[in-house]
C-alpha cells in the first residue's frame, strides 16, 4: 500500500494519528501489507498520479494495481473494511 500525502494535509495527519495507530489497523496492515508513505512535496511519486491527498494505491508484489485508486481518508472501521476487502479479493483471484 502506498499512501501519498502532504505535511499540511489535515486528513493525512488524522489518518496517521488516529487510524494507522489503531491496534487493529496496525496489526492487519503489518500482517497483510507492506506500507509506504510518500510526501508528494518532497518524494518522487514513482510515476503514480495523485489526485489530492491522501491518495492510496494498492499493489501486488509485482507492483501491479490490485484495486482502484482510493482517494481520501477513512475511519478505523472504514479502513479495516477496505483492507479486508482487498485481501479477500486477492485471495479469490489466486484460486
Image: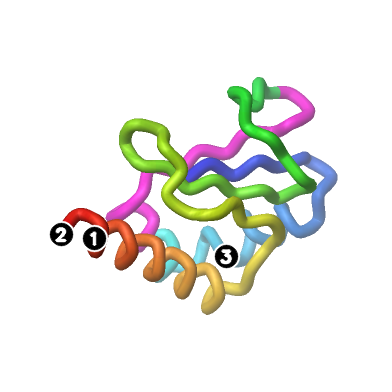
Q: Give yes or no for residue 40 being in the magenta stretch.
A: yes
Magenta highlight range: 28-42
Judged from this view, the residue extending furthest toward the bottom is 77
- For marks 2 and 1, give the CA distance: 7 Å
| Mark 3 surroundings within 10 Å by alpha-carbon count, few (fewer than 14), some (14 through 19), many (20 or more) | many
The answer to whether 32 appears left or right of 52 in the picture is left
Q: Residues within 10 Å of mark 2 (few under 14, many from 20)?
A: few
To which residue does mark 3 refer?
Answer: 19
How far across and how far down the image is residue 44, in percent? 66, 21
x and y percentages locating residue 81 in the rendered image: 46, 74
Q: Residue at x 64, y 68 (%)?
A: 74
The answer to the question of whether label 2 and label 1 lie on touching residues, with beta carbons closer than 8 A, is yes
Q: Is residue 27 visible?
A: no
Point out the residue furthest to the left here. Answer: 95
Q: Nearer the viewer, residue 65 or 77?
A: 65
Q: Which residue lies under the disc numbered 2?
A: 95
- The answer to which of marks 2 and 3 sits earlier in the sequence is 3
Q: Which x, y percent locates residue 45?
A: 65, 27
User: What is the C-alpha distance between the residues marked 1 and 3?
Assistant: 25 Å
The vertical placement of 14 against 59, above or below, is below
Per the image, the residue denoted by label 1 is 91
- Displayed quadrant of residue 95: bottom left
User: Does the segment drawn in magenta span residue 73?
Assistant: no
Determine whether label 1 and label 3 are within 8 Å by CB: no
Q: Is residue 12 above or below residue 4?
A: below
Q: Compared to 58, does 81 lie above or below?
A: below
User: What residue sits 78% from the left and 28% below the top?
Assistant: 41
CA gap, disc 2 and disc 3: 31 Å
Residue in the image at 50% along x and 38% along y: 36
Question: Residue 31: x percent and y percent?
Answer: 28, 55
Q: Secondary structure at mark 2?
A: loop
Amino acid at each position: 500500500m502506498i499512501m501519498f500525502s502532504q505535511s499540511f494535509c489535515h486528513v493525512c495527519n488524522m489518518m496517521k494519528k488516529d487510524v494507522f495507530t489503531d491496534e487493529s489497523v496496525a496489526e492487519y496492515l503489518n500482517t497483510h501489507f507492506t506500507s509506504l508513505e510518500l510526501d508528494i512535496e518532497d518524494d518522487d511519486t514513482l510515476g503514480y498520479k495523485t489526485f489530492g491527498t491522501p491518495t492510496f494505491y494498492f499493489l501486488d508484489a509485482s507492483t501491479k494495481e490490485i484495486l482502484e485508486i482510493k482517494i481520501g481518508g477513512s475511519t478505523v472501521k472504514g479502513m479495516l473494511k477496505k483492507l479486508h476487502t482487498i485481501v479477500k479479493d486477492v485471495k479469490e483471484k489466486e484460486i
